[in-house]
Amino acid sequence: MVWIDQPVGTGFSPAKNGTPQSIKNEHDVSVDFMGFWKNFMETFDLVGRKVYITGESYAGQYIPYIAYNMLETNNTDYYNVSGIQINDPSINHDDTLIEGTQ
C-alpha cells in the first residue's frame, strides 16, 4: 500500500527544490501521477503488479482521470488497473445530475 498526496505541492509532498509545479487541472494531476507511478514501479521492481487506486474527498475528482489515463495507455506492465475505490467523494454534481437522469 502506498499513500500519495495529490497534487504535488500539497500536504506532505513538496515539489523539487520547493518550487510548485504548474498543475492546473485534473488532467495535469493524472499525467504527473503516471510519471511518478512508472518510476515507482521500476524502482521497487513491481512491474506487472495489479493496481487499485483509492482515495477520499477531493480524490473523487482525481481518481477517475488517473484511472482513465492509465487504462488508455493499454500498458499493464506499469498501469494494471484492477479497481478503484472513492470514499466520501467530492464529485461534479452537474455531471451526476445529467447522467443520473438519462
Image (cartoon, helix red, strand yellow):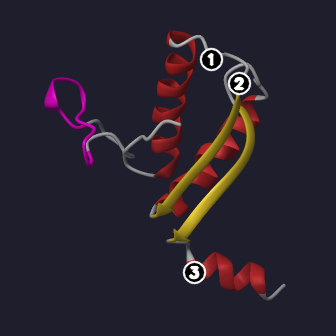
Of all residues, the one furthest to the left in this rendering is 18
* Amino acid on which disc 3 is placed: His
Along the horizontal axis of the image, is 24 left or right of 1? left
- Label 1–label 2 contact, CB within 8 A: yes
Q: Nearer the viewer, residue 67 or 24?
A: 67
Does dot 3 land on a helix, a strand or a loop?
Answer: helix
The label on residue 46 is 1
Does dot 1 land on a helix, a strand or a loop?
Answer: loop
Magenta residues? Answer: 10-20
Q: Which residue is mark 2?
A: 49
Q: Nearer the viewer, residue 97 or 6?
A: 6
Residue 23: where, in percent of width, then height? 36, 43
* Amino acid on which disc 1 is placed: Leu
Q: Is 64 above or below relative to 40?
A: below
Q: Residue at x 76, y 79 (%)?
A: 99
Q: CA distance from mark 3 to mark 1?
A: 37 Å
Dot 2 or dot 3: first in sequence order is 2
Along the horizontal axis of the image, is 96 left or right of 30? right
- Label 2–label 3 contact, CB within 8 A: no
Name the main secondary structure of what is drawn in magenta. Answer: loop
